[in-house]
Amino acid sequence: MKSILIKNALIINEGKAFQGDMLIKDGYIEQISREVISDNNYEIIDATGLWLIPGIIDDQVHFREPGLTHKASIATESAAAVAGGVTTFMEMPNTMPNAITQELLEQKYVIAQNCSPANYSFFMGTTNDNIEEVLKTNPKNVCGVKVFMGSTTGNMLVDEPHVLEELFSKCDMLIATHCEDEETIKENTKLYLVKYGDNILPIHHPEIRSREACLISSSFAAELAKKNNTRLHILHITTLEEIALFANNIPLKEKRITSEVCVHHLTFESKDYEVLGNLIKCNPAIKYKEDRMALWAALLDNHLDIIATDHAPHTVEEKTNSYIKSPSGLPLVQHSLQQMMEHSKNGMITKEKLVEKMCHAPADCFRISKRGYLREGYYADVVLYNPNLPYTVSKSNILYKCGWSPFEGKTFSGSIHSTFVNGVKVYDESGLKGINAGMRLLFER
Protein backbone atom coordinates (compact mmCIF):
# COMPACT_ATOMS: atom_id res chain seq x y z
CA MET A 1 0.00 0.00 0.00
CA LYS A 2 1.58 3.26 -1.12
CA SER A 3 1.81 6.06 1.45
CA ILE A 4 -0.36 9.08 0.67
CA LEU A 5 0.51 12.64 1.65
CA ILE A 6 -2.37 15.12 1.64
CA LYS A 7 -0.97 18.66 1.61
CA ASN A 8 -2.34 22.15 2.17
CA ALA A 9 -5.80 21.11 3.39
CA LEU A 10 -8.00 22.92 5.87
CA ILE A 11 -8.07 20.25 8.57
CA ILE A 12 -11.30 20.28 10.61
CA ASN A 13 -11.08 18.12 13.71
CA GLU A 14 -11.85 18.20 17.46
CA GLY A 15 -13.29 21.71 17.40
CA LYS A 16 -10.45 23.31 15.45
CA ALA A 17 -9.71 24.22 11.83
CA PHE A 18 -6.15 24.79 10.61
CA GLN A 19 -4.10 24.54 7.45
CA GLY A 20 -1.93 21.44 7.39
CA ASP A 21 -0.82 18.12 5.96
CA MET A 22 -1.68 14.49 6.70
CA LEU A 23 0.42 11.41 5.96
CA ILE A 24 -1.41 8.10 5.49
CA LYS A 25 0.68 4.94 5.77
CA ASP A 26 -0.33 1.26 5.87
CA GLY A 27 -3.99 2.14 6.36
CA TYR A 28 -3.44 4.45 9.33
CA ILE A 29 -2.89 8.15 9.94
CA GLU A 30 0.87 8.36 10.36
CA GLN A 31 1.32 12.10 10.88
CA ILE A 32 -0.72 15.30 11.10
CA SER A 33 1.23 18.53 11.05
CA ARG A 34 1.32 22.08 9.76
CA GLU A 35 3.83 20.67 7.28
CA VAL A 36 4.85 17.06 6.61
CA ILE A 37 8.15 16.68 4.76
CA SER A 38 7.49 14.85 1.49
CA ASP A 39 9.28 11.72 0.31
CA ASN A 40 9.68 10.44 -3.22
CA ASN A 41 7.77 7.30 -2.23
CA TYR A 42 4.64 9.23 -1.26
CA GLU A 43 1.63 9.77 -3.51
CA ILE A 44 1.02 13.49 -3.05
CA ILE A 45 -2.45 15.06 -3.17
CA ASP A 46 -2.50 18.86 -3.29
CA ALA A 47 -5.58 19.72 -1.24
CA THR A 48 -5.33 23.49 -1.58
CA GLY A 49 -8.84 24.88 -1.18
CA LEU A 50 -10.20 21.58 0.17
CA TRP A 51 -11.42 20.65 3.66
CA LEU A 52 -10.07 17.48 5.29
CA ILE A 53 -12.41 15.83 7.81
CA PRO A 54 -12.85 12.40 9.42
CA GLY A 55 -15.11 10.04 7.48
CA ILE A 56 -18.79 10.30 8.41
CA ILE A 57 -20.10 7.56 10.71
CA ASP A 58 -23.80 6.86 10.10
CA ASP A 59 -25.25 4.90 13.01
CA GLN A 60 -28.59 4.09 11.36
CA VAL A 61 -29.11 2.79 7.84
CA HIS A 62 -31.29 0.18 6.14
CA PHE A 63 -29.48 -1.48 3.24
CA ARG A 64 -32.25 -4.10 2.74
CA GLU A 65 -30.06 -7.18 2.26
CA PRO A 66 -30.93 -10.01 2.54
CA GLY A 67 -34.42 -10.42 1.19
CA LEU A 68 -35.38 -6.93 0.01
CA THR A 69 -32.75 -6.46 -2.66
CA HIS A 70 -35.22 -5.09 -5.21
CA LYS A 71 -34.92 -1.90 -3.11
CA ALA A 72 -31.21 -1.91 -2.24
CA SER A 73 -28.23 -4.07 -1.36
CA ILE A 74 -25.21 -3.76 0.88
CA ALA A 75 -23.02 -3.35 -2.22
CA THR A 76 -25.07 -0.58 -3.85
CA GLU A 77 -25.81 1.45 -0.73
CA SER A 78 -22.29 1.23 0.73
CA ALA A 79 -21.02 2.49 -2.64
CA ALA A 80 -23.46 5.40 -2.42
CA ALA A 81 -22.28 5.97 1.16
CA VAL A 82 -18.60 6.42 0.29
CA ALA A 83 -19.55 8.67 -2.64
CA GLY A 84 -21.16 10.86 0.00
CA GLY A 85 -18.22 10.82 2.40
CA VAL A 86 -19.71 8.18 4.71
CA THR A 87 -16.89 5.76 5.59
CA THR A 88 -18.71 3.74 8.27
CA PHE A 89 -22.28 2.51 8.65
CA MET A 90 -24.34 0.57 11.18
CA GLU A 91 -27.21 -1.31 9.60
CA MET A 92 -30.58 -2.35 10.99
CA PRO A 93 -31.96 -5.89 11.46
CA ASN A 94 -35.36 -5.60 9.73
CA THR A 95 -34.23 -7.42 6.61
CA MET A 96 -35.78 -10.67 5.32
CA PRO A 97 -35.18 -12.80 7.24
CA ASN A 98 -34.86 -10.55 10.25
CA ALA A 99 -31.42 -10.66 11.88
CA ILE A 100 -32.71 -12.20 15.11
CA THR A 101 -30.31 -15.12 15.57
CA GLN A 102 -26.55 -15.06 15.84
CA GLU A 103 -26.31 -17.12 12.66
CA LEU A 104 -28.49 -14.75 10.63
CA LEU A 105 -26.60 -11.77 12.01
CA GLU A 106 -23.23 -13.23 10.98
CA GLN A 107 -24.50 -13.89 7.47
CA LYS A 108 -24.83 -10.13 6.98
CA TYR A 109 -21.22 -9.60 8.06
CA VAL A 110 -20.10 -12.15 5.47
CA ILE A 111 -22.00 -10.30 2.73
CA ALA A 112 -20.43 -6.98 3.72
CA GLN A 113 -16.95 -8.46 3.91
CA ASN A 114 -17.25 -9.47 0.27
CA CYS A 115 -18.68 -6.25 -1.16
CA SER A 116 -18.50 -3.16 1.04
CA PRO A 117 -16.17 -0.23 0.33
CA ALA A 118 -17.23 1.24 3.71
CA ASN A 119 -16.66 -0.04 7.24
CA TYR A 120 -19.64 -1.83 8.70
CA SER A 121 -21.47 -3.16 11.70
CA PHE A 122 -24.93 -4.71 12.02
CA PHE A 123 -27.42 -4.48 14.87
CA MET A 124 -28.79 -7.61 16.50
CA GLY A 125 -32.60 -7.63 16.27
CA THR A 126 -35.08 -8.30 19.05
CA THR A 127 -38.53 -9.86 19.04
CA ASN A 128 -41.01 -10.75 21.76
CA ASP A 129 -39.45 -14.21 22.06
CA ASN A 130 -35.71 -14.18 21.27
CA ILE A 131 -34.24 -12.71 24.45
CA GLU A 132 -31.84 -15.61 25.06
CA GLU A 133 -30.42 -15.27 21.55
CA VAL A 134 -30.02 -11.50 21.99
CA LEU A 135 -28.02 -11.97 25.17
CA LYS A 136 -25.42 -14.02 23.25
CA THR A 137 -24.42 -10.94 21.23
CA ASN A 138 -20.75 -10.00 21.47
CA PRO A 139 -20.36 -6.32 22.50
CA LYS A 140 -16.79 -6.26 21.17
CA ASN A 141 -17.75 -6.74 17.51
CA VAL A 142 -21.47 -5.87 17.24
CA CYS A 143 -22.60 -2.23 17.45
CA GLY A 144 -25.73 -2.84 19.49
CA VAL A 145 -29.14 -4.40 19.99
CA LYS A 146 -32.09 -2.86 18.13
CA VAL A 147 -35.60 -2.70 19.57
CA PHE A 148 -38.57 -1.53 17.50
CA MET A 149 -40.88 -0.09 20.18
CA GLY A 150 -43.11 0.98 17.32
CA SER A 151 -43.87 -0.95 14.14
CA THR A 152 -42.21 0.08 10.89
CA THR A 153 -40.85 -1.73 7.79
CA GLY A 154 -40.64 -5.40 8.76
CA ASN A 155 -42.41 -7.36 11.51
CA MET A 156 -40.23 -6.74 14.54
CA LEU A 157 -42.48 -4.88 16.98
CA VAL A 158 -41.54 -5.56 20.60
CA ASP A 159 -44.54 -4.46 22.65
CA GLU A 160 -44.80 -6.86 25.60
CA PRO A 161 -43.81 -4.97 28.77
CA HIS A 162 -42.33 -8.02 30.50
CA VAL A 163 -40.08 -8.68 27.48
CA LEU A 164 -38.84 -5.09 27.47
CA GLU A 165 -38.28 -5.23 31.23
CA GLU A 166 -36.25 -8.42 30.90
CA LEU A 167 -34.21 -7.06 28.01
CA PHE A 168 -33.41 -3.76 29.72
CA SER A 169 -32.48 -5.50 32.96
CA LYS A 170 -30.28 -8.23 31.46
CA CYS A 171 -28.64 -6.73 28.35
CA ASP A 172 -25.29 -5.16 29.19
CA MET A 173 -24.61 -3.65 25.76
CA LEU A 174 -26.05 -0.63 23.96
CA ILE A 175 -29.78 -0.89 23.19
CA ALA A 176 -30.96 1.31 20.32
CA THR A 177 -34.68 1.98 20.13
CA HIS A 178 -37.24 3.14 17.60
CA CYS A 179 -39.80 4.80 19.87
CA GLU A 180 -43.42 5.28 18.81
CA ASP A 181 -46.40 4.09 20.82
CA GLU A 182 -48.27 1.51 18.77
CA GLU A 183 -51.68 1.91 20.43
CA THR A 184 -51.69 5.67 19.89
CA ILE A 185 -50.84 5.22 16.21
CA LYS A 186 -53.55 2.56 15.78
CA GLU A 187 -56.18 4.83 17.33
CA ASN A 188 -55.10 7.80 15.21
CA THR A 189 -55.19 5.66 12.07
CA LYS A 190 -58.75 4.52 12.83
CA LEU A 191 -59.88 8.12 13.28
CA TYR A 192 -58.35 9.24 10.00
CA LEU A 193 -59.75 6.25 8.11
CA VAL A 194 -63.22 7.15 9.35
CA LYS A 195 -62.73 10.79 8.40
CA TYR A 196 -60.94 10.41 5.05
CA GLY A 197 -61.25 6.77 3.99
CA ASP A 198 -58.74 6.04 1.22
CA ASN A 199 -58.10 9.77 0.78
CA ILE A 200 -55.70 10.21 3.67
CA LEU A 201 -52.85 12.43 2.48
CA PRO A 202 -49.14 12.56 3.37
CA ILE A 203 -49.76 15.86 5.19
CA HIS A 204 -51.70 13.82 7.76
CA HIS A 205 -48.71 11.60 8.54
CA PRO A 206 -47.39 13.66 11.49
CA GLU A 207 -50.91 13.71 12.94
CA ILE A 208 -51.28 9.93 12.69
CA ARG A 209 -47.75 9.10 13.87
CA SER A 210 -48.07 11.94 16.30
CA ARG A 211 -45.75 13.72 18.71
CA GLU A 212 -47.75 12.12 21.55
CA ALA A 213 -46.95 8.65 20.19
CA CYS A 214 -43.25 9.51 20.16
CA LEU A 215 -43.20 11.01 23.64
CA ILE A 216 -45.11 8.14 25.28
CA SER A 217 -42.70 5.56 23.87
CA SER A 218 -39.47 7.53 24.38
CA SER A 219 -40.46 8.32 27.97
CA PHE A 220 -41.15 4.64 28.63
CA ALA A 221 -37.77 3.64 27.20
CA ALA A 222 -35.99 6.27 29.27
CA GLU A 223 -37.79 5.13 32.44
CA LEU A 224 -36.78 1.50 31.79
CA ALA A 225 -33.19 2.55 31.19
CA LYS A 226 -32.98 4.63 34.36
CA LYS A 227 -34.55 1.87 36.43
CA ASN A 228 -32.09 -0.75 35.16
CA ASN A 229 -29.06 1.48 34.45
CA THR A 230 -29.29 0.34 30.81
CA ARG A 231 -27.12 1.83 28.10
CA LEU A 232 -29.90 3.29 25.92
CA HIS A 233 -29.62 5.11 22.59
CA ILE A 234 -32.91 6.54 21.27
CA LEU A 235 -32.91 6.93 17.51
CA HIS A 236 -34.40 9.69 15.30
CA ILE A 237 -35.85 12.14 17.81
CA THR A 238 -38.51 14.31 16.12
CA THR A 239 -40.38 16.37 18.72
CA LEU A 240 -39.63 19.31 20.96
CA GLU A 241 -41.27 17.50 23.91
CA GLU A 242 -38.80 14.59 23.80
CA ILE A 243 -35.74 16.81 24.20
CA ALA A 244 -36.28 17.09 27.96
CA LEU A 245 -35.55 13.35 28.27
CA PHE A 246 -31.86 13.94 27.56
CA ALA A 247 -29.06 15.56 29.54
CA ASN A 248 -26.67 18.17 28.17
CA ASN A 249 -24.61 18.87 31.27
CA ILE A 250 -22.35 15.80 31.23
CA PRO A 251 -19.78 14.58 28.66
CA LEU A 252 -21.11 12.24 25.98
CA LYS A 253 -18.87 9.37 27.09
CA GLU A 254 -20.48 9.51 30.55
CA LYS A 255 -24.09 9.52 29.36
CA ARG A 256 -26.14 6.35 29.89
CA ILE A 257 -29.01 7.65 27.73
CA THR A 258 -28.05 9.17 24.37
CA SER A 259 -29.94 10.34 21.32
CA GLU A 260 -29.83 10.82 17.57
CA VAL A 261 -31.42 13.29 15.19
CA CYS A 262 -31.68 12.67 11.45
CA VAL A 263 -30.80 14.87 8.49
CA HIS A 264 -34.36 14.87 7.13
CA HIS A 265 -35.87 15.94 10.45
CA LEU A 266 -33.43 18.87 10.51
CA THR A 267 -34.17 19.74 6.88
CA PHE A 268 -37.87 19.21 6.18
CA GLU A 269 -41.08 20.17 8.00
CA SER A 270 -44.81 19.56 7.55
CA LYS A 271 -45.28 22.08 4.73
CA ASP A 272 -42.86 20.05 2.58
CA TYR A 273 -45.40 17.22 2.29
CA GLU A 274 -47.34 19.47 -0.10
CA VAL A 275 -44.53 19.19 -2.68
CA LEU A 276 -42.73 15.95 -1.82
CA GLY A 277 -45.67 13.92 -0.52
CA ASN A 278 -44.92 10.26 0.16
CA LEU A 279 -41.27 10.76 -0.85
CA ILE A 280 -40.64 12.14 2.64
CA LYS A 281 -43.06 9.83 4.43
CA CYS A 282 -40.99 8.18 7.15
CA ASN A 283 -41.29 6.78 10.67
CA PRO A 284 -41.22 8.65 12.95
CA ALA A 285 -42.81 11.34 10.86
CA ILE A 286 -41.29 14.64 9.80
CA LYS A 287 -43.29 17.03 11.96
CA TYR A 288 -43.68 20.79 12.30
CA LYS A 289 -41.52 23.90 12.06
CA GLU A 290 -41.44 24.34 15.83
CA ASP A 291 -40.17 20.78 16.19
CA ARG A 292 -37.48 21.25 13.55
CA MET A 293 -36.21 24.44 15.16
CA ALA A 294 -36.26 22.82 18.60
CA LEU A 295 -34.23 19.90 17.25
CA TRP A 296 -31.61 22.33 15.95
CA ALA A 297 -31.37 24.08 19.31
CA ALA A 298 -31.10 20.75 21.15
CA LEU A 299 -28.42 19.53 18.76
CA LEU A 300 -26.32 22.65 19.26
CA ASP A 301 -26.60 22.61 23.06
CA ASN A 302 -25.82 18.85 23.22
CA HIS A 303 -29.17 17.50 24.39
CA LEU A 304 -29.07 15.57 21.08
CA ASP A 305 -25.82 13.76 20.41
CA ILE A 306 -25.55 12.38 16.86
CA ILE A 307 -26.63 13.28 13.33
CA ALA A 308 -27.52 10.26 11.16
CA THR A 309 -29.72 9.43 8.18
CA ASP A 310 -32.00 6.43 8.81
CA HIS A 311 -31.33 5.80 5.09
CA ALA A 312 -34.32 3.67 4.07
CA PRO A 313 -34.77 3.18 0.32
CA HIS A 314 -37.96 2.00 -1.38
CA THR A 315 -38.69 1.88 -5.09
CA VAL A 316 -40.37 4.80 -6.82
CA GLU A 317 -43.29 2.52 -7.65
CA GLU A 318 -43.76 1.70 -3.97
CA LYS A 319 -43.51 5.32 -2.87
CA THR A 320 -46.02 6.58 -5.48
CA ASN A 321 -48.80 4.39 -4.08
CA SER A 322 -51.59 5.97 -2.06
CA TYR A 323 -50.63 7.20 1.41
CA ILE A 324 -51.88 4.06 3.16
CA LYS A 325 -50.01 1.72 0.80
CA SER A 326 -46.81 3.75 0.46
CA PRO A 327 -43.98 2.44 2.70
CA SER A 328 -42.15 4.76 5.06
CA GLY A 329 -38.52 5.72 4.53
CA LEU A 330 -36.30 7.76 2.21
CA PRO A 331 -32.74 7.40 0.84
CA LEU A 332 -30.22 9.90 2.22
CA VAL A 333 -26.77 8.40 2.81
CA GLN A 334 -25.17 9.70 -0.41
CA HIS A 335 -26.08 13.33 0.29
CA SER A 336 -26.14 13.68 4.08
CA LEU A 337 -22.76 15.40 4.34
CA GLN A 338 -23.51 17.80 1.50
CA GLN A 339 -26.90 18.69 2.97
CA MET A 340 -25.41 19.32 6.41
CA MET A 341 -22.63 21.39 4.85
CA GLU A 342 -25.38 23.41 3.20
CA HIS A 343 -26.93 24.00 6.61
CA SER A 344 -23.49 25.07 7.83
CA LYS A 345 -23.07 27.52 4.98
CA ASN A 346 -26.48 28.96 5.86
CA GLY A 347 -25.40 29.55 9.45
CA MET A 348 -27.30 26.74 11.18
CA ILE A 349 -24.21 24.90 12.45
CA THR A 350 -20.47 25.48 12.35
CA LYS A 351 -18.34 23.10 10.32
CA GLU A 352 -16.52 22.13 13.52
CA LYS A 353 -19.79 21.23 15.27
CA LEU A 354 -20.94 19.33 12.18
CA VAL A 355 -17.80 17.17 12.33
CA GLU A 356 -18.36 16.62 16.05
CA LYS A 357 -21.92 15.38 15.55
CA MET A 358 -21.35 13.27 12.42
CA CYS A 359 -17.88 11.85 13.18
CA HIS A 360 -16.64 12.23 16.76
CA ALA A 361 -19.95 11.68 18.58
CA PRO A 362 -20.89 8.38 16.90
CA ALA A 363 -17.41 7.04 17.64
CA ASP A 364 -17.69 8.07 21.30
CA CYS A 365 -21.30 6.97 21.71
CA PHE A 366 -20.65 3.46 20.40
CA ARG A 367 -17.03 3.34 21.64
CA ILE A 368 -15.70 2.49 18.19
CA SER A 369 -12.05 1.55 18.19
CA LYS A 370 -9.69 4.04 16.45
CA ARG A 371 -12.21 5.78 14.20
CA GLY A 372 -14.14 9.04 14.09
CA TYR A 373 -11.20 11.38 14.64
CA LEU A 374 -8.16 12.61 12.72
CA ARG A 375 -5.54 11.28 15.12
CA GLU A 376 -2.15 9.72 14.57
CA GLY A 377 -2.48 5.96 14.96
CA TYR A 378 -6.16 5.93 13.98
CA TYR A 379 -7.49 4.26 10.84
CA ALA A 380 -7.27 6.57 7.85
CA ASP A 381 -11.01 7.04 7.25
CA VAL A 382 -10.91 10.54 5.81
CA VAL A 383 -12.80 12.75 3.38
CA LEU A 384 -11.72 15.68 1.26
CA TYR A 385 -14.60 18.11 0.69
CA ASN A 386 -14.58 20.87 -1.90
CA PRO A 387 -16.68 23.76 -0.55
CA ASN A 388 -16.50 25.67 -3.84
CA LEU A 389 -17.54 23.09 -6.44
CA PRO A 390 -21.33 23.01 -6.89
CA TYR A 391 -23.02 19.64 -7.31
CA THR A 392 -26.52 19.07 -8.68
CA VAL A 393 -28.32 15.86 -7.70
CA SER A 394 -29.74 14.10 -10.76
CA LYS A 395 -30.78 10.61 -11.77
CA SER A 396 -27.45 10.27 -13.61
CA ASN A 397 -25.40 10.59 -10.40
CA ILE A 398 -27.69 8.96 -7.83
CA LEU A 399 -26.04 5.68 -6.80
CA TYR A 400 -28.87 4.22 -4.73
CA LYS A 401 -30.39 1.11 -6.26
CA CYS A 402 -33.83 2.73 -5.94
CA GLY A 403 -32.60 5.49 -8.26
CA TRP A 404 -34.24 8.51 -6.60
CA SER A 405 -33.56 11.10 -3.92
CA PRO A 406 -35.68 13.73 -2.14
CA PHE A 407 -32.87 16.13 -3.11
CA GLU A 408 -33.17 15.42 -6.85
CA GLY A 409 -32.73 18.68 -8.76
CA LYS A 410 -31.10 20.46 -5.82
CA THR A 411 -27.69 22.08 -6.30
CA PHE A 412 -25.39 21.84 -3.29
CA SER A 413 -22.67 24.45 -3.02
CA GLY A 414 -19.98 21.83 -2.32
CA SER A 415 -18.88 18.39 -3.49
CA ILE A 416 -17.16 15.29 -2.17
CA HIS A 417 -13.66 15.41 -3.66
CA SER A 418 -12.45 12.03 -2.40
CA THR A 419 -13.09 9.40 0.25
CA PHE A 420 -10.52 7.13 1.88
CA VAL A 421 -11.40 4.02 3.90
CA ASN A 422 -8.62 2.39 5.89
CA GLY A 423 -6.13 4.39 3.84
CA VAL A 424 -7.54 3.28 0.49
CA LYS A 425 -9.09 5.76 -1.92
CA VAL A 426 -12.52 4.30 -2.66
CA TYR A 427 -14.05 7.35 -4.36
CA ASP A 428 -12.96 10.56 -6.05
CA GLU A 429 -14.44 13.02 -8.51
CA SER A 430 -13.90 10.54 -11.33
CA GLY A 431 -16.14 8.02 -9.57
CA LEU A 432 -16.07 4.86 -7.49
CA LYS A 433 -12.86 2.84 -7.48
CA GLY A 434 -14.53 -0.56 -7.04
CA ILE A 435 -12.38 -1.45 -4.03
CA ASN A 436 -13.95 -3.25 -1.09
CA ALA A 437 -11.79 -1.62 1.58
CA GLY A 438 -14.33 -1.77 4.43
CA MET A 439 -13.61 -3.57 7.70
CA ARG A 440 -15.81 -4.90 10.48
CA LEU A 441 -15.96 -2.43 13.34
CA LEU A 442 -14.51 -3.28 16.73
CA PHE A 443 -15.67 -1.66 19.95
CA GLU A 444 -13.83 -0.76 23.15
CA ARG A 445 -16.33 -2.09 25.66
Image (spheres, grey):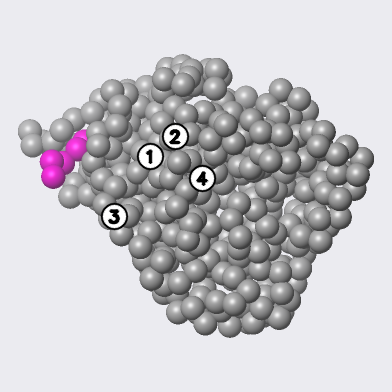
Badge 1 is on which residue? 76
Mark closer to the observer (4, 3)? 3
Where is residue 243 drawn, in percent x and y? 75, 53
Cα distance between the residues tagged 3 and 2: 19 Å
Give the magenta range.
1-5
Marks 1 and 2 in Cβ contact (< 8 Å): yes
**Quadrant (top left, top right, bottom left, bottom right) of the C terminus:** bottom left
Q: Report the front residue among 21 and 121.
A: 121
Q: Earlier in the sequence, mark 3 or mark 2?
A: 3
Q: Residues within 10 Å of mark 2 (few under 14, many from 20)?
A: many
Cα distance between the residues tagged 4 and 3: 24 Å
The amino acid type found where label 4 is placed reads Met
Q: Secondary structure at mark 1?
A: helix
The residue shown at (33%, 53%) is 112
Badge 3 is on which residue? 113
The amino acid type found where label 2 is placed reads Tyr
